[in-house]
């Protein structure tokens, strides 16, 4: 995703694809989402729409009905209540809670969020939830260079420990996801490697600068001792 793409531009790209393929659930989700733009939560909406855009760009060999479910779940699940404008979650709940296909996947993702590291077993049980979570990781890794070092290293470690194996699981157990899972796995692996190299490089530079500062401090202390000794000799 290019930084110059605004939230509205991503929205319009997704909207065009949804309309072109006549996806009714995703169309309703987009209509409900649009009025809440620019109300202090664009980061969350941008991430959701970026997942939708990736889903479209991957050209998964699945039916329009299944794509409709994937896109809709990507829009409505796991949005933090305390950071979303009043009315958004209620609007989404009122529209999609009767849709059992959507509600089931959203509930699995919710349980996975609450389960911690054991969530991967939950995700493996449902192809929709698995693909949404893998694409979300693929979107997040694009911005890894902006993260604080400690958070970035934890993200890289978790990606290697859990998400790369999940990509392999998707390839082995969901034939329709072989291509997408391969692309996402390479993307995660390569961006984690690149960001880790940058982190190590900066860590090395920081260490070198710290050593240089320490050396200068020691030289400064030595010079002060020499000056003090010279002054004592003059006045002695």
Image (cartoon, helix red, strand yellow):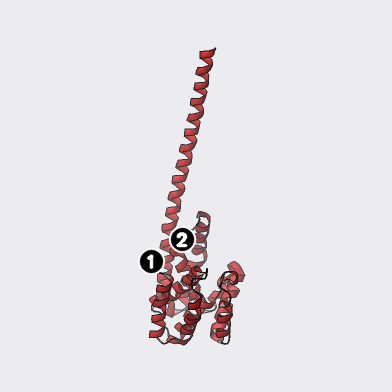
What percent of the width, then of the height, locates residue 49? 45, 74
Q: Quadrant of residue 61?
A: bottom left
Q: Quadrant of the C terminus?
A: top right
Rendered residue at 51%/14% (across/down) = 234
Name the residue rendered at 49%, 68% in the picture. 43
| Tag of residue 4 | 1
User: Residue 79 at x, y = what percent?
Assistant: 55, 73
Residue sitting farthest toward the top:
236
Q: Residues within 10 Å of mark 1 (few under 14, many from 20)?
A: few
Element class at badge 1? loop
Residue 216: give x, y in percent of width and height: 47, 33
Among the two numbered marks 1 and 2 on one chain, the one whose residue lies closer to the N terminus: 1
Query: Residue at coordinates 53% horizontally, 75% vertically from top-left?
Result: 124
Q: Is residue 204 left or right of residue 114?
A: left
Q: Nearer the viewer, residue 207 or 80?
A: 80
Tell me how far mark 1 sits from mark 2, CA to CA: 17 Å
Q: Could one spot residue 165 in this view of the protein? A: no
Please identify, in this view, whether the residue under mark 1 or under mark 2 is nearer the observer: 1
Q: Is residue 2 above or below residue 131?
A: above
Viewer-proximal residue, 22 or 37?
A: 37
Say whether residue 221 is visible: yes
- The quarter of the rendered structure image containing the N terminus is bottom left
Residue 42 vs 148, above or below: the answer is below
Numbered tag placed on residue 144 in the rendering = 2
């Amino acid at each position: 995703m290019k930084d110059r793409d605004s939230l509205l531009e991503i929205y319009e790209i997704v909207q065009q694809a949804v309309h072109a393929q006549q996806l009714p659930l995703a169309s309703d989700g987009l209509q409900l989402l649009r009025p809440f733009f620019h109300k202090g939560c664009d980061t969350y909406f941008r991430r959701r729409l970026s997942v939708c855009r990736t889903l479209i760009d991957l050209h998964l060999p699945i039916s329009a009905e299944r794509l409709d479910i994937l896109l809709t779940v990507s829009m409505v699940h796991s949005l933090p209540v305390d950071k979303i404008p009043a009315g958004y979650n209620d609007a989404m709940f009122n529209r999609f809670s009767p849709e059992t296909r959507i509600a089931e996947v959203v509930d699995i993702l919710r349980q996975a969020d609450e389960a911690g590291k054991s969530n991967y077993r939950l995700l493996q049980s449902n192809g929709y939830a698995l693909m949404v979570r893998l694409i979300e990781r693929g979107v997040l890794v694009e911005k890894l260079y902006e993260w604080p070092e400690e958070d970035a290293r934890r993200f890289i470690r978790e990606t290697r420990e859990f998400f790369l194996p999940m990509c392999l699981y998707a390839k082995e157990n969901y034939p329709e996801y072989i291509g997408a899972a391969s692309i996402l796995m390479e993307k995660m692996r390569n961006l984690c490697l690149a960001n880790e190299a940058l982190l190590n490089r900066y860590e090395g530079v920081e260490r070198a600068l710290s050593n240089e500062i320490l050396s200068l401090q020691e030289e400064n202390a030595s010079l002060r001792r020499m000056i003090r000794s010279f002054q004592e000799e003059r006045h002695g």
